[in-house]
Amino acid sequence: MCVIIYDGTWEGWLTLVFEMFEFKVSVTAIYRNEQPLQQDIFVPWKRVTTDKSKAQRVWKGLQLRIPKYAQENLFCAFLSELPQIEATLCSAVCFYFSTVEEGHLAFGRNDVLTIHQTAKMVNRERHRMKAFTRFKKQKNGLYFAVIEPDFNVLPLINEHFMRRYADQRWLIYDTKRDYGIYYDLNLVSEVKLTNETVLLDDMVQLEEDEILYADLWQQYFKSTNIKERKNVRLHVQHVPKRYWKYLTEKSI
């Protein structure tokens, strides 16, 4: 039994799984990047170094054991960043690699059910980010959007926006996790602002037409709102308040 520390990446977690089997260790807890502040002196800890070849071997093995949607559920659950979700994933993967067939459907197990339920929450957030992401055109021609999702969904929405805005340079920045995805008309890559405050202030310099379009959109939203049929409860249900500060139509 041991406590595992890894770098917090998907490949790092797959490497962790490989070493669990290689060294035949039982994991009591998993931490990202840093050693836990309070640690049981009777339980040793191990730091896992990401190895792409090991990660690939584990992923190929999973592809043979479970269908594609179950593979995607694993990845979505990992992106939830919930406390100790990695340990739950490890428990489920060990079960998948056992002799049990269709282990991903064993919802009587707590780990399998948790992955299924967590993946649904992450996918719901992914769809909301597709709908609630608002770009603003900057003077340099870059379309810039700020989001703050509950889960780390940027890896799940990059292809959607690359297809939808294939002829525009854009940047979507997750302020909660301090990184973004940038499309340069060819590829999507991860970026991190070296000086977030300065760069964000610079990017707020909107193109003059963008200010006009934002005003028109706000006026349209306001004029189509029928006060007599206003249902705040239903509206908040579909558009939770935590997203409002990044919606152009709400900046009225």
Image: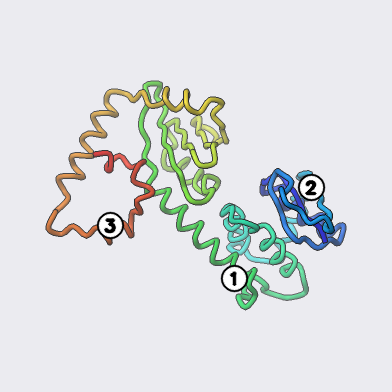
Amino acid type of disc 2? Val
Whichever of callouts 3 and 1 sits on the residue coming sooner in the sequence is 1
- List the residue tagged with mark 2: 48
Q: Quadrant of the C terminus?
A: top left
Amino acid type of disc 1? Leu
- List the residue tagged with mark 3: 235
- List the residue tagged with mark 1: 113
Does residue 73 appear to the left or right of 126 in the view shown?
A: right
The answer to whether the residues at label 2 and label 1 have Cβ atoms under 8 Å apart is no
- Residue furthest out toward the right: 23
Whichever of callouts 2 and 3 sits on the residue coming sooner in the sequence is 2
Does residue 203 appear to the left or right of 85 in the view shown?
A: left
Whichever of callouts 2 and 1 sits on the residue coming sooner in the sequence is 2
Amino acid type of disc 3? His
CA separation in Å, label 3 and label 1: 30 Å
Front in this rendered view, residue 121 or 70: 121
Residue at (47, 27) in percent of width and height = 197
